[in-house]
Image (cartoon, rainbow, N blue to C red):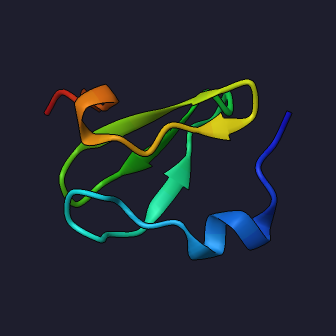
Amino acid sequence: MTLSQDLLAILACPACKGVLAVTDDGSGLVCEACRLRYPVRDGIPVMLVDEAEKLDG
């Protein structure tokens, strides 16, 4: 399942309000500014900082 472009356009990173990008496999949303990955479960983005995964590098 993919996220609609309309939904993606209104979502922002809850930590820094940065722009989010969908991962290649569609399993998450990534904020490059603060290097967090938010999971997408059953087609629904989980936009909680406590659920986010810190990316390396």
Q: Residue at x 46, y 59 (%)?
A: 20
Q: Quadrant of the N terminus?
A: top right
Q: Residue at x 50, y 37 (%)?
A: 46
In this rendering, would 52 be left or right of 46? left
Residue located farthest toward the left when viewing the structure as drawn: 57
Q: Quadrant of the C terminus?
A: top left
Q: Residue at x 52, y 55 (%)?
A: 21
In the image, residue 33 lies at what x, y percent?
A: 22, 60
In this rendering, would 44 be left or right of 6? left
In the image, residue 55 lies at what x, y percent?
A: 24, 30
Q: Nearer the viewer, residue 10 or 2?
A: 10
Q: Is residue 56 above or below residue 33?
A: above
Q: Is residue 42 above or below residue 12?
A: above
In the image, residue 5 lies at what x, y percent?
A: 77, 67
Q: Residue at x 32, y 69 (%)?
A: 18
Q: Tell me the quarter of the picture where residue 53 sits.
A: top left
Q: Tell me the quarter of the picture where residue 27 sits.
A: top right
Count of numbered tags:
0
Q: Nearer the viewer, residue 12 or 35?
A: 12
Q: Is residue 40 above or below residue 35?
A: above
